[in-house]
Amino acid sequence: MKLKQFSFLLLAGMLAQAAWGATQEYHFANGLKLIVKEDHRAPVVVSQIWYRAGSMDEFNGTTGVAHVLEHMMFKGTKKIPAGQFSKRIAAAGGKENAFTNRDYTAYFQQLQADRLPLAFELESDRMEHLNLTDAEFAKEINVVMEERRMRTEDKPQALVYEQLMATAFQQNPYRRPVIGWMNDLTQMTGEDARTWYKRWYAPNNAVMVVVGDVKPDAVFKLAQKYYGKAKAHILPLRKPQEELAQNGIRRVTVKAPAKLPFLIMGYHAPTLRDPVKDWEPLALEVLAGVLDGNDSARLNQALVRERQIASQVGGGFDAIARGPGMFMLEGTPSEGKSVSELEAALREQVEKVKTDGVTEEELNRVKAQVVAAQVYQRDSMFYQAMLIGEFEMVGIGYKAVDQRLKGLQQVTAEQVQTVARKYLTDGNLTVAVLDPQPLENKAPRKLMPGVRHDN
Amino acid sequence: MIIKLMRFLVALSGACTILTAYAALPIQHWVAPSGAQVYFVENHDLPMLDLSVDFAAGSSRDVPAKAGLAGIVRHMLELGAGGISETEISKRMADVGAELGGHFDLDRAGLSLRTLSNAREREAALAIMTAVLQQPDFPDSVLQREKTRAIAGLKEAETQPDFIAGNAFSKALYGTHPYALPEEGEVGTLEVLTRNDVADFYRTHYTSNGATVGLIGDVTRAEAEAIAQRLTERLPKGDNPAAISTVPLPTQAVTNEIAHPATQSHILIGYPGIKREDADYFPLLVGNYVLGGGGFDSRLTRDVRDKRGLAYSVYSYFMPFKEAGPFELGLQTKKEQTGEALQVVRKTLRDFIERGPTEAELKQAKNNIIGGFPLRIDSNKKILEYLSLIGFYQLPLDYLERYPRSVARVTLAQVREAFKRRIDPDKMVTVVVGGPEVAK
C-alpha cells in the first residue's frame, strides 16, 4: 500500500513537469496579463480573454447585467458592425462563444493556429470600442429572458438550486443567480449595460489565455500589437461582503410541475486561497470523491444500490472560487420514499465519516483518479485553457493548477475526517426541497392530420 | 469570373491545409480473428489509451412491446460480469483511474474505455472491460432495481416539456418505423422486461462479427491487435444484423399540440432526413449550415433571435443514421408568442427550400466547414468518435480526407435541388408543447 502511494506521487510530479513546463506568462504596461501554453498535438489554437467581472460584482436591482453585457459584446463596434464578429470568425473556420459565471466573464475563439491574429484583432477591438445601442439592447434583453425561462423558470431542479443559494447566502453576492432575477431583467436598460462595460472592461481587469500550436514569444508580439495601446482604468474597490456564520439550519421549499421530489443540502465551506498552505479545501474535495467519486463510492453504493432509498444521489465540492464555497449533497428519493427519509440517510453518511473516518483504500482510489485526470485533461486544449483562466480569475494563479494536484496527493484520512467534523454541521446547513406539483391533467390532443398553421 | 475563381481557390486552399493535418492521422484497419472490424490510430503523444466497442444494438433493434430493452441491456453490461460484482467493477476501474463510458442511439450501442497506457493500469482496466463485454451476468436483483430506477426517471421526464416534445416528435415523424421507439422505453414496456429478455437480446446483438472496435493512443499495432482480439474473441457468434427498413415519407402535414404549464412553448418541426451513406449528404449538410446549423451565422438565428428576440436557442440539423434520421428544426419561446415564432420559422424554412442559399452564404458555409475541419480531429476523444463512425457505417477509410473535398465541390444548384427534392414544407411534422391555444 505504501509503495503504491509513492509511485502515484512520483508519476504526478513527472507529469506536472511535462504538462506545464511550456507555459509562459507576460505582463503588459497597461495591466493586461497573457498566459501562453504550447500544445503542438494539432494545428489549432484556442484564444480566451477573461474579465474579472462576474455576477458577484453586481448590485441589487441590476442582477444579471454581467451576463447581459456578454450578449451585447456580439452587437458590434464602430469598426465591426453587429454580427460581423461572428461572421468573420466563422469564415475563418473558427468557433467562438462566451460564458459568464459568478466570478468572471470570458470570451473565446478556436481556430487553425495561423488564424490567431484575426481573433486578437476582433477581441481587442471590442475591449474598448463596443457600440452598445438601446435598439440592440431592447431586442437582446428579450433573448436573455428567454434564456432564463429555458434554463431556470421551466427547470424545477434549477429553481431549487437557485433557492438554495439565495437562502444559504444572505450577505454574500453568491446569493444571486448568474442570469439575474427576472424582475431585474425586465427593468434593465441599455445604460445599465454601458455602465457595467465602462466599469470592468479594461486591460488591467483581464487575463488572456492562449493554448495551442503556437510559439509564446510570437503570441506576445501579436498581443502587444493589438492590446498594447489599450488604456488601463481605475477599477472600483471590491468589498469582501463576507457571509456571517449561519448558526442554525435553514430550509426552503420550491413548488413546481414535476413528478418526483428532489433535495439539495448545502454546507458552507472554505475555498482555496493559499494553494501551498491551505489543506482544508483540498480535504473537502477528497471527501467529495470518497462520497461520490465513482459508482461504488459511498453515496451511490449505500443509498441507491443497497438501501434503494434514492433513485439518484450525488455530492460535490468546488474549491476554486473567488467567493465562499459550498459542499453539496443532492438526490431524488425512490418512489414511495420521502425527501425527509433521504435527508436522514444522507446525514447518516455524513455522520459515518465524522465518527469512523475514511479508509486508506478509499483515499488511494480518489488519488488514483486525480493522477489519471491530470493526464486526460491534456487531451483537450480548451479544457487546459479553462483551468488556467479559472485559477487566474480566482487570484491564485495558473501555477496553482499543479499545486492543487500535489496538495490533493498529500491529503490524509485524518484531514478528511477533520473537515467533515468542522464543516458538515447542522449550523452550517441549508436544505432546499422540490415539492412536485401535478401537471394540469388535460389529455394531450390527438394527432391532427392536415392541420397547418401557416399565417 | 475572377471572383468565382478566387472563391474556388479559397475553398481549395482550405482543403489543402486539412490534408496536411490529416496526413498525421493514418487509420489502420483490420479484421480480428474474432471477426470484429478494428480501426486504430497509433499516437504516443500522451500516456493514455481510448477505445470503444460498438454493436448494431441501438433502440431501433427493440420491438414495440419491449421498448427500452436495448438501453437496459447496454446499461446492465457494467453491473456485474464474469462473477465480478457491480461494486467491484467500478472500484477496480477507479483504482487505476480508468473511465468506463458508453454510447447509445437509434442504431448503435457500445462501451468505451479511457485508461492510462502504463502496463499496470491498462491491464487492470482491460481485464474488467473484457469481462463486461463478454461475460455479463445480468444479476436479476440488479435488473429489478435498475428497472425501478428507469421507470422513476421516465415518470419524471414525462412531466418535462423538452422530453415530451422529443418523444411526440419521434412518434409523429416515424409512426410504426423502429426509429419511433423511445430510447428510454415506456413505463409499461419496462415493467414487463425479464432477465431472459436481457440475456436473449445480448446473445443475438452483441456478436463478435458485428463488433466494431476503435482504438487511439499509446499502444503499438501488435498491442492493439491483441487488445481488439481479447475484447471480442468470446463474444456470442451470430448472424450479421438485419437491415433496418426504409423510412416512409409523410403523406400529409401533422401537427401535435400538447398543453403544459411551463412558461415557454417547445416547438419542433421536422421531416425524415438523410442516411449516413446518402448521395445528398454534402449538399444538405452545407445547405443546412446556412439555414440553421451555423449558430450565429445561420438564417434561423438571424430571423428568430437577432431580429426579433423570440428565442435564445433556435437551430436546424440533419442527424444521419443507417436509414433516414430526422431533419429537425427547434426552438423555445415565451408561450404568448408561440404563434408569431411559428410563423417566422416556417417562413424562413419555406424561403430557404424555395430559393436556397445565396452565392455568398454558400461560400461562407464552405469556408467554415472546411476551415474548421482541424478542430474536429484535435483530440483523441474526437478521433475515437470518428473511428467508431467510420467502422460502424462502413465508410471509406479516407472518409476524413475526402470530407473537406466533398464540401468544396458542393454547388449552389445542388443545394437548392437537394432541399427541394428531400424536404416538403407542406408535409412537415410539427410538435408544440406548452401553449396550444396560441399556436393557431
Image (spheres, rainbow, N blue to C red):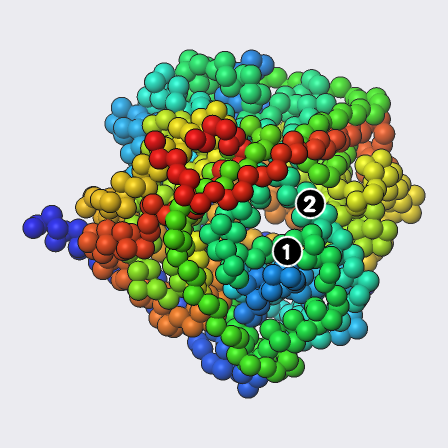
Asked which quadrant contains residue B205, the reply is bottom right
Classify B69 as above or below A118.
below
Identify the residue at image location x=69%, y=26%: A163
Residue A269 visible, this orientation:
no
Left/right placement of residue A452 relative to residue B78 reads left
Residue A178 in sight here: yes
Measured as percent of width and height from the top left, residue A421 is found at: 86, 37
Q: Residues within 10 Å of mark 1 (few under 14, many from 20)?
A: many
Task: Look at label 2 and name its amino acid.
Answer: Lys
- Residue drawn at x 7%, y 50% is B1
Instruction: Spot the residue most to the bottom.
Output: B33
Q: CA distance from mark 1 to mark 2?
A: 11 Å
User: Where residue B336 sits: x, y (%)?
Assistant: 48, 24
Q: Tell me the kind of residue under disc 1.
A: Gly
Q: Which residue is mark 1?
A: B185
Q: What chain does mark 2 sit on?
A: B
Q: Which residue is label 2 attached to?
A: B155
